[in-house]
Amino acid sequence: MGFMKLVLDQYRKEMKQELEDILAYWMRYTIDEKNGGFVGRIDHDNQVYADAPKGSVLNARILWTFSAAYNLNRKHEYLNIAERAFQYFRNHFIDKEFGGVYWSVDHKGQPLDTKKQIYALSFAVYGLSEFYCASKNSDALTAATGIYDDIIKHSYDQKHGGYIEALSRDWNEVDDLRLSSKDFNEKKSMNTHLHVLEAFANLYRVRPNELLRQQLTELVHLFLKSIISAKNNHLILFFDGQWSERSHIISYGHDIEAAWLLQQAAELTGNELLVLQIKKRSVQIAQAAKEGLDKDGGLWYEYDPGVNHLIKQKHSWPQAEAMIGFFNAWQNTNDEKYLQHSLNSWEFVKKYMHDQKCGEWYWGVNEDYSAMNQEDKVGIWKCPYHNSRACIELINRINSLID
């Protein structure tokens, strides 16, 4: 264990430094001194777009990140940023008339896209519950609980189970359910359900009750029954309202992310049989995700088996999830190949994802390792959540193993 302890201690040391570096970037560049909150967009070259819209997902993820960082190391500068994020989110993203949260507001904080995307509501619950854990601000817990209630009341499918993707501002059906332009226009998706699970798990940590435990358990079973493919252990991405499969595309990043998030949620339920079942499936999902690993340690983005097409890009967020997901598989199996995959993912990040000139991580790299410089450094989708969470999660896991 001596050599292993040295390896883990070094990994933890590097994660602590990486977390500081990531958060320093966000504190230095993203504070919107003119309009409040945080700027809506910074491009690849660190140019700030002061008039860019502000997304609820980005702002909820900033709220979660700085709250979680404070919960890890109690640095008050992180709590101060979390407080800023909370105040802006509460004042501008929460729909005070109809409930839920807007998808986006303009740079001055006025409602822009008012559609109720359940994915965004889930991140609101995730961020607000983490902030409550950090601050013990009862208003944050009240807000998190209210948005959770909105998800259950308006999105839950009483007949077929699961959650409808999106609704109008006043909770009526909408024709366009898509989370982004690349998504399928279907009633249910893996991605939304993964983050509903994540949100409910985080809320359960701070406000445990039997109904929420049952809802969390139901979500885990839903993944086992419908979302994890029985054929290949990859996640199925899109479904109609009755859970018929609507997509065959494989998302390696979502596979490895789900592998550990599902286990974490199952462990919260206290159902020992379910935990054993999920641990087994978690390793199977990690093994399936391993198909997307390149020899350089990086994880490819997506693969379409129907036309045998691999998208030869390595986006930043799947590398962060691979760091956690393969570490989790090692903890489940004691098979050191999984620990090596986690370490290799981190080595890939250090070599190819770090923007040595401007800071933070690139959106991703192309097959030839050139940066995807048309993509944002900060934006509706580019946030500090995946990479900061990888650092925080690995620090906590290593602490539990060697301290």
Image (tube, grey):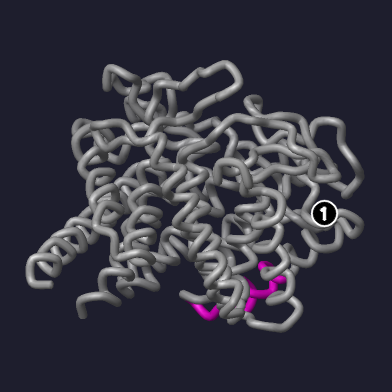
Name the element at disc 1. helix
Task: Evaluate whether residue 106 shows in this view.
Answer: yes
Please, is residue 138 above or below residue 51 in the view?
below
Which residue does the image show at 49% across and 55% down from the upper left? 259
Q: Is residue 218 magenta?
A: no
Q: Main secondary structure of the magenta part?
A: helix
Q: Position of residue 237 (x, y in %)?
A: 64, 38
Q: Quadrant of residue 188?
A: top right
Q: Residues within 10 Å of mark 1 (few under 14, many from 20)?
A: many
Image side of residue 67 versus residue 373, left or right: right
Q: Is residue 171 left or right of residue 14?
A: right
Where in the figure is residue 369, as x and y percent of width and height? Answer: 27, 22
Q: Position of residue 393 (x, y in %)?
A: 36, 63
Report the number of discs: 1
Given residues 305 and 397, the one toward you in this image is 305
Q: Residue at x 30, y 40 (%)?
A: 360
**Where is 386 relative to 248, above or below?**
below
Q: Residue at x 80, y 31 (%)?
A: 176
Q: Amino acid at mark 1?
A: Ser
Please give the range of residues in magenta.
135-145
Give the residue at mark 1: 155
* Location of residue 348 by image quarter: top left
Front residue of this view, candidates 111 and 336: 336
Residue under the point 26% across and 75% down: 401
Left or right: where does residue 281 sit relative to residue 150?
Answer: left
**Measured along the vertical axis of the image, is residue 304 above or below residue 66?**
above
